[in-house]
Amino acid sequence: MNIEPANPTGKNPPEQFAGDVWLDPIALPHEGDQRMVVATVRFAPGARTAWHSHARGQYLRVTQGVARFGGRDGTTIEVYPGQTLYTPPGEEHWHAAAPGCFMEHIAMLEHGDDPATTTTWLEHITDDEYNGTQP
């Protein structure tokens, strides 16, 4: 058994996030056959991810604030504390804090066969996509 050492909070890169987003790792693989990754992610009001997908899908448990999630079909939904959103493997999506409030979620996913392929990052979302007003 181990008590895990505390990892420093990291700021997510602007190539993949718009606005201020911070990540605190909770669980990372220790052994070669382990895949589980868990992190707390905090978004400033209006901060958002770029479009992306995960090789093995992802669970996001909203713990504070109001989250927005969008899919390529133009759907934008809001998710509230205590709700969990699941995105299946390969589904392109984005997540964000709603305007005017911070948002926090716990991200849970598994590494891909090659950890470098766990998440495929794409283009930044537009303001219309974020606001659910895209044509």
Image (cartoon, rainbow, N blue to C red):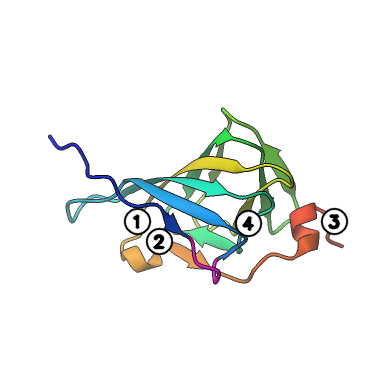
Q: Name which of mark 2 and mark 4 comes first in the sequence.
A: 4
Viewer-nearest of discs 4 and 3? 4
Q: Position of residue 29 (x, y in %)?
A: 25, 51
Q: Position of residue 118 (x, y in %)?
A: 40, 61
Question: Are circles 3 and 2 on residues that touch, CB within 8 Å?
Answer: no
Q: CA distance from mark 2 to mark 4?
A: 19 Å
**Secondary structure predominantly adopted by residues drawn in magenta:** loop
Say which residue label 1 marks.
Answer: 111
**Identity of the amino acid at label 3?**
Thr
Which residue corresponds to the image point at 74% horizontal and 50% vertical from the top-left? 75
Say which residue label 4 marks.
Answer: 48
Which residue corresponds to the image point at 53% horizontal and 60% vertical from the top-left? 53
Q: Name which of mark 3 and mark 2 comes first in the sequence.
A: 2
Q: Position of residue 78 (x, y in %)?
A: 70, 40
Q: In this rendering, is residue 86 above or below 54?
A: above
Q: CA distance from mark 3 to mark 2?
A: 30 Å
Say which residue label 2 marks.
Answer: 118
Question: Are circles 2 and 4 on residues that touch, CB within 8 Å?
Answer: no
Say which residue label 3 marks.
Answer: 133
Viewer-nearest of discs 3 and 1? 3
In the picture, which quadrant includes the N terminus? top left
Magenta-tinted stretch: 12-16
Q: Is residue 74 visible?
A: no
**Identity of the amino acid at label 2?**
Thr
In the picture, which quadrant includes the C terminus? bottom right
Question: Are circles 1 and 2 on residues that touch, CB within 8 Å?
Answer: yes
Viewer-nearest of discs 2 and 4? 4
Q: Give 34 or 16, whichever is nearer the viewer.
A: 16
